[in-house]
Amino acid sequence: MAKIVDDGVMHQDLSVITEIGAYMVGVSILGLIISIINVYVSSRAAIGFGTDLRSTLFEKIQQLSFTEIDKFNSASLITRLTNDITRMQQVILMGMRLMLRSPLMLVMAVFFVIKINTDLALIMIGAIPVLGISVFLILRKGFPLFMKVQQKLDQLNAVVRENLINIRVVKSFVREDFETKKFEKSSEELRDMVINASNVVVSIFPVMQLIMNVSVIVILWVGGGKVMTGELKVGELISFVNYLMQILMALMLLSMVIMNVARASASSERILEVLNTEPSLENTTEGIANTHKINKGEVIFRKVFFRYSGGENDVLKDINFHIHQGETIAVVGATGAAKTSMLQLIPRLYDTTAGEVLIDGVNVKDYNLDELHAEIRMVLQKNELFTGTIIENLRWGKPDATIEEVEEATKAAQAHDFIMSFTDGYNTLRLQEL
Ligand SMILES: Nc1ncnc2c1ncn2[C@@H]1O[C@H](COP(=O)(O)OP(=O)(O)O)[C@@H](O)[C@H]1O
Ligand SMILES: [Mg+2]
C-alpha cells in the first residue's frame, strides 16, 4: 500500500501500481485458499471433539449410581450433554480459526509498524496494555455470571422435563395455565441472567472501539506532523493506519475468543464435574474376583440402617428379617414408609448406611455388580417405554428371548390380546398411550 502511494501515485507511475496490485491480489488469493483449508480442518476437529466428549460423558453417566444421578439431577445432566458440550464445541471451532491467526497478525503488524517509524509505533504499543487490562477486568466479572446462566438453563430444562413427563396429569387436572406460568417464570429468570451477563461482557466492545478511535486520531495527528516535516511519507502514514486497524482488529477478535472461552469454561467445569465423579457403588475387590451365583434367593437383612446422601434422617432403622427360598412376601406401609428404599438395597442400587444385606448368605457387596443386577428382577411402580417396537421393548431386558418366551410373559400379564389388536402386533412402534 505504501509503495503504491509513494512510488506509484506520487510519481504517477501506473506500472508500479499494477505490479504491486497484482502481487496483493495474489497474496489475497493464497489467503483465501488457506482460509478454506482452515475452515474445513477446524470444523471437522471441533465436531469430532464434541462427539467424542458427548460419548465419554454419556458413558460416564451410565456408570454412575443412583446417588450421583440424584445429586446432579437428570435435567442438569441433559443440559450438560447438549448445551454445555455445544458451547465448548463452538469455542474450539472459533479458537482454531483465530487463536493462531490473531496473535500472528498482531506480531507481524507490530513488527512492520516499528520498521516504518519507531516513534509512532510506541504510541500504538502503549494502547495494547490498556486494552489488555480492560478485557481482563471485564472477563473476571463475567465468568461467575456465565456459570449462573447455565444453572438457570438447568432449571428451565427441569421444568420442561417434569411437565412433559407428567403431561397427562397436567391435562387431567387442567393445570396448563399454572404450568405455563411456572415455565414463564423460569424462562424470564434465564433471560434476566443472560442480559445480566451480556451487559458486563458487551461493554468490551465500546471500550475497544474507543481505544481504537483514540489511537487512530493520535497517530494521524502525530504522523501528520511528521509528514509535513518530511520525516514520513504519505504512503507510509496510510499503511501505518492500516496496520493499526489490523492490530486492533486482531485484538478485538482475540478478546472475542477469550470472552467465549470464559463462557465455555463455565460449561467445561460443569462437564468435568461429572467426568470426575466416581460412582459410589462399584465392584468391591471381593466383588470383582467373586463368582458367587444366586441360586436359592434367600434374603437376609441384618441390622440395616439407610439414609439418602444429603438426607437428614435414616429412612430405615434397624431392619431385620429373613426371607426363605420360595416365599412370597408383601411389605405393607404408608406412603413414604421406605418400602421402595428397602427394596432397592437388595440389588444394591444403594448401599446400606449400616448393617448388611445378604443373599444366599453372601453380602451383596461381595457379588459382582453386573451379576447381581442381572439376577434380580424388579418391576417398578412406574414403567417407561423405550423408542422402538413393542417386541424390542419386551426383549430389552433379555435380547435373546424367544418369541415363545415373550408370548408366555405377555399372556401372563394379560397383554397379548391387547398387543395383537394392533395391525402390526408385536412390531407396532411405541405408542405413548401404551
Ligand atoms: N432419591 C431419594 N433421595 C432422598 N430421599 C428419598 C429418595 N427417595 C425416597 N426418599 C425419601 O425416603 C423416604 C422413603 O421413601 P420410599 O422408599 O419411596 O417410600 P415408599 O416406597 O414406602 O412410599 C421418604 O421420606 C422419601 O422422601
Ligand atoms: Mg414406593
Image (cartoon, rainbow, N blue to C red):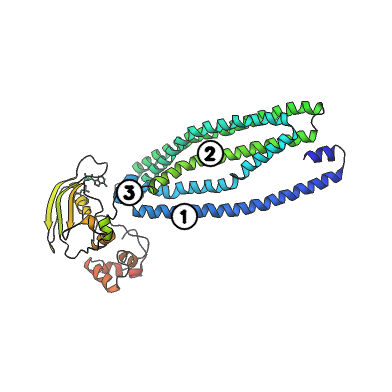
How far apart marks 2 and 3 lie (CA) works out to 31 Å
Disc with the residue nearer the chain's start (2 vs 1): 1
In the displayed structure image, the side of residue 405 where residue 77 appears, left or right: right
**Are discs 2 and 1 less than 8 Å apart at CB?**
no
For residue 238, the mark is none
For residue 69, the mark is 3
- From the viewer's side, name the closer residue of 287 and 33: 287
Which amino acid, mark 1? Asp
Judging by the rendered image, the residue that carries numbered circle 1 is 52
How far apart marks 3 and 1 lie (CA) works out to 21 Å
Estimate the x, y position of residue 138 in percent, counting from the top left: 52, 32
Would you say residue 343 is visible in this rendering? yes
Of all residues shown, which one is farthest toward the right? Answer: 12
Dot 1: within a 10 Å radius of its alpha carbon, few (fewer than 14), some, or many (20 or more) residues?
Answer: few
Is the C terminus in the top left, top right, bottom left or bottom right quadrant? bottom left
Name the residue at 56% across, 53% down. Answer: 43
301 w.r.t. 241: above or below: below
Q: Secondary structure at mark 2?
A: helix
Dot 2: within a 10 Å radius of its alpha carbon, few (fewer than 14), some, or many (20 or more) residues?
Answer: many
Which amino acid, mark 3? Ile
How far apart marks 2 and 1 lie (CA) works out to 24 Å
Judging by the rendered image, the residue that carries numbered circle 2 is 259
Dot 3: within a 10 Å radius of its alpha carbon, few (fewer than 14), some, or many (20 or more) residues?
Answer: some
In the displayed structure image, the side of residue 65 where residue 11 appears, left or right: right
Estimate the x, y position of residue 385 in percent, counting from the top left: 32, 59
